[in-house]
Image (cartoon, grey):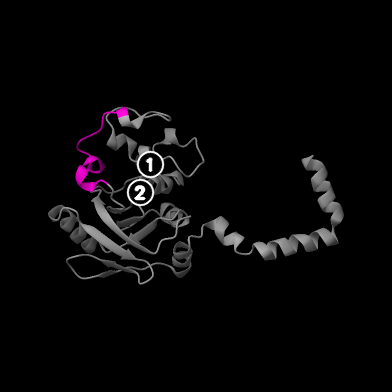
Amino acid sequence: MKAFTVLDGLVAPLDRANVDTDMIIPKQFLKSIKRSGFGPNLFDELRYLDEGYPGQDTDSRPVNPEFVLNNPRYKGASVLLARENFGCGSSREHAPWALEDFGFRCIIAPSFADIFFNNCFKNGVLPIVLDQALVQELFDQVEREQGFRLTIDLNTQTIKRARGAAIEFEVEGFRKHCLLHGLDDIGQTLQDADAIREYEAACRMRSPWLFDSIAGVQQ
């Protein structure tokens, strides 16, 4: 998993509430369990005018000119500004996969669905909860200022902008540690790889018959 330390990113505004995970990545794209390759189909039903399906050449599809991510002004954005209850609906982990694969490393909203919020941290995406008035202030700035960027420093838990006061945000300590060091669930486990090997070796010494039985089943 990519570590998250400091992000200086262009901001794209998604001005709609209750964006669910099926809107983020539609169900027909969930067949793969790889973490990559979902970016082209992020917000598929909003970005394109035709019906999408796996393996389709997205470069030749008709795009929706009204959808914000098709606006050249927001090309290359890595910060998504959203409204309340972002990521509601089913618990699919493909949603943060698609956001990260598209290029978003941070999402700012007044509130998130709990499972989606947790999945973001496990996949290198930082979800930031801000007061609704602050979120509205950022929406207003994005609209007024072309090329509006934010610098998000996870270590100091601050959001800086060219104009306006810095904004502080909260993040739970363990999640912060994992993001700063690029540790997903597997990465956390592998930190104790030596202790795990020692434990397995001790088990093999105490109960060699058990490991012989396992080897026989695998053959």
Residue 53 is drawn in which quadrant?
top left
Q: From the viewer's perspective, tell me whether residue 11 is left or right of residue 6.
A: left
Residue at image coords 34%, 56%: 106
Q: Is residue 92 visible?
A: no
Which residue is identified by label 2? 103
Query: Are circles 1 and 2 on residues that touch, CB within 8 Å?
Result: yes
| Mark number, residue 39 | 1
Q: From the viewer's perspective, tell me whether residue 48 is left or right of residue 97.
A: left
In the displayed structure, 160 sits above or below 210; it is below
Q: Which residues are magenta?
A: 60-75
Per the model, the C-alpha gap separating discs 1 and 2 is 8 Å
User: Is 65 inside the magenta-drawn segment?
Assistant: yes
The image shows residue 199 at horizontal and vertical percentages of: 74, 63
Residue 52 is drawn in which quadrant?
top left
Q: In the displayed orientation, state which residue is furthest to the right.
A: 209
In the displayed structure, 200 sits above or below 158; it is above
Q: Residues within 10 Å of mark 2 (few under 14, many from 20)?
A: some
Q: From the viewer's perspective, tell me whether residue 181 is left or right of residue 132.
A: right
Number of numbered labels in the structure image:
2
**Which quarter shows the C terminus?**
top right
The image shows residue 49 at horizontal and vertical percentages of: 27, 29
User: Is 177 inside the magenta-drawn segment?
Assistant: no
Residue 158 is drawn in which quadrant?
bottom left
| Mark number, residue 141 | none
The image shows residue 36 at horizontal and vertical percentages of: 45, 43
Identity, as a three-letter code, of the amino acid under mark 1: Gly
